[in-house]
Image: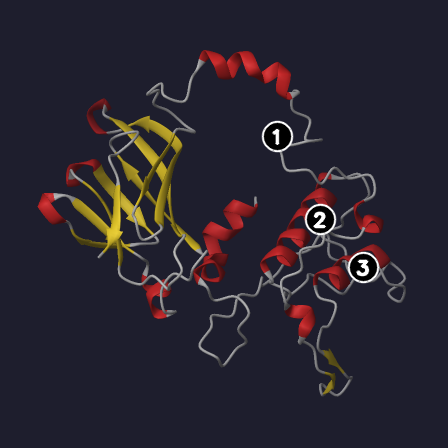
Amino acid sequence: MPDIWTRQWAHPVLCGCEGGRPGEGVPAIVPGEWGGRFEAGSLERAWALAFAQWQRETGLTDSFFWCLNPNSGDTGGLLTDDWASPQEWKLALLAAINPAPTRFGRDGGVVEAGGGAPYARPVRPLPASLTAGVDMAPRGGAGGGGPPATAAAPAAAAAPPSAPAAGVGLEAAASHPSGLTLTSRVTSSWAGPGGRPAYQMDVTITNGGTAQARDVAWSLPDPALVDQAWNCERAAGGGGGASFSLPAWCLQAGGLAPGASVTAGGVFFEAQPAWSVRPA
């Protein structure tokens, strides 16, 4: 889920935009509405913990939580059914995400301004009092319910990384001496027009250099391989190929900061295009 949240709507923070405040030319990223009953032992509670931890890790400490009143049929509220007592676990979860919120009085005025140091990206996990009894390990990692590493070894030996097997999960990489790298991964596949194999891919550009990268392009030699692309700008390809640049929102933010990355996507008629990456 964190990869989906980042790719679908939180990607501006991956372009070196984190740490800014509204009015400083930095996009404001605020989850508009989220909530739930979060009953102990439920998958909904595990989801809430994962979303809260991801917000802490990305520094997205502001959000709109649904809701206050307890009579919401699908989510319940921050108040219990007596309309007076708080749902303590929910309040503790929100406090863990944003330890210094702005507080308003009954008249709508600001009683206590939030922000400051608590808005820096925390690296600590959620408090144990919140996560008790919930497996917080990434899916497939330690404690994630997967088989032990020794049990997976035979399967890995049967399919060495050098085998050019096409299909979902296939990854490829390209790099440039400036420190720019591209990693592509097949996320789904199907039979395209005329039965031609089609593949949807995530394409992640990472700036491993020491300077802001703005004029960046990645390309593949045959434009006929491209069916569609998103979160990037199609550019004229050198040598008759297909070329792409950073998305407009990233360029408007000044480019790709050192250590930052941006994920585009597309549909291609080849499982593993021969990508290249370069400063434009």
Q: Label 1: which residue?
A: 140
Tell me the distance, in whole angstroms, between the alpha carbons under discs 2 and 3: 11 Å
Neighbor class of circle 3 (other Cα within 10 Å; few <14, some 14-19, many 20+) is some
Toward the viewer: 97 or 18? 18
Query: As drawn, is 63 to the left or to the right of 166?
Result: right
Q: Label 2: which residue?
A: 49
Asked whether disc 1 touches disc 2, contact meaning CB atoms under 8 Å apart, the reply is: no
Tell me the distance, in whole angstroms, between the alpha carbons under discs 1 and 2: 17 Å
Query: As drawn, is 206 to the left or to the right of 132?
Result: left
Q: Position of residue 110 (x, y in %)?
A: 72, 86
Q: Label 3: which residue?
A: 92
- The amino acid type, in three-letter code, at marker 2 is Leu
Q: Earlier in the sequence, mark 1 or mark 2?
A: 2
The residue drawn where x is 35% and y is 51% is 179
Residue 99 position by quadrant? bottom right
Q: Position of residue 206 (x, y in %)?
A: 40, 51
- The amino acid type, in three-letter code, at marker 3 is Ala
Disc number at residue 58?
none
Neighbor class of circle 2 (other Cα within 10 Å; few <14, some 14-19, many 20+) is many
Residue 91 position by quadrant? bottom right
The residue drawn where x is 55% and y is 69% is 19
- The amino acid type, in three-letter code, at marker 1 is Gly
Q: Is residue 24 above or below residue 238?
A: below
Q: Earlier in the sequence, mark 1 or mark 3?
A: 3
Secondary structure under tag 1 reads loop
Neighbor class of circle 1 (other Cα within 10 Å; few <14, some 14-19, many 20+) is few
